[in-house]
Amino acid sequence: MTALNVAQFTVLVTCVIPGVVYQAVRARLAGEAPQNRDTTNKVLRALAASVVLASIYLIVFGRTIVTALGGDAAQTRRWVSQHARLTGALALLLLFAVPALAAILAARRWQIGARVSAYRYRGPLDPDRRLGRALAGRAVNRLLTWVEARSETRSGLQYDPTPTAWDWAVDHGASSEGYVRVLGKDGQWKGGAFGRNSYFTTYPELPAIYVEQAWQLDDDGRLRSVQDASRGAWIPCAEALTVEFIAGNDPSRDDQPGIMG
């Protein structure tokens, strides 16, 4: 590996991976923020997070990083071979563990603040105790009061990791085997039975359903009978007027209201 390749690899590692890990963990915990739907904005935010983390790493581990990467390619390989365990530990810590921890703190800061602020006027900070009466204790209690007020107004602020209402509907309406009927923009009903062998496309693909058993529906959307020799059907839902998920064991029975009717 040439010195140029070492530099390129270092830039890739320090300016991309930490930010990507940070954003992935934060989105997993708090949901994807709307501004991150734009690819350019998402990349810039990841780079910004990586730069901030890399700056902190240089402050804390500056001597070690400069020693490891400051020379030519041969010197870098020699240092890595002599400190293989340290290199692996630092890579795991700096590229994955620290960004993930930072993301957890960022995503859960209001919940953490609510828990921490619960200790105001308690224990050593009790006004009847020496620390609670002291200037430092009173200052800490005022700070925790401010944190509690902020946590109460912001603790519920998060973006749901389910990106669209369609994904939510599929996750809940199709959580167990049943039936589905789709009203297309042409006014025609389509549907059938879904189960283990059915499939629902979700974000970012256009909504669509593959039902493992197609049914015949009348003009009112009632499921009448199984299509002859049905081996399933694909139903596009991107322009559907409505999609309904129906529970029931046998929609051809008369005791299934709203299905046979």
Image (cartoon, rainbow, N blue to C red):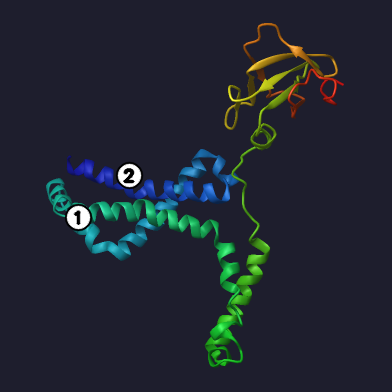
Residue with the most extreme right position: 261
Q: Residue at x 21, y 54 (%)?
A: 85
Image spot of residue 200 (x, y percent)? 61, 26
Image spot of residue 173 (x, y percent)? 70, 34
Q: Which mark is residue 131?
A: none
Location of the C terminus (image quadrant):
top right
For badge 2, the amino acid type reads Leu
The tag earlier along the polypeptide, 2 or 1, is 2
Q: Which mark is residue 68?
A: 1
Say whether marks 2 and 1 touch (CB < 8 Å): no
Image spot of residue 52 (x, y percent)? 41, 57
The answer for how far apart the CA atoms under marks 2 and 1 are is 16 Å
User: Toward the viewer: 20 or 167?
Assistant: 167
157 w.r.t. 224: above or below: below
Question: Is residue 11 visible in this depiction of the protein?
Answer: yes
Q: Secondary structure at mark 1?
A: helix
Image spot of residue 185 (x, y percent)? 77, 19
Mark 2 highlights which residue? 12
Location of the N terminus (image quadrant):
top left
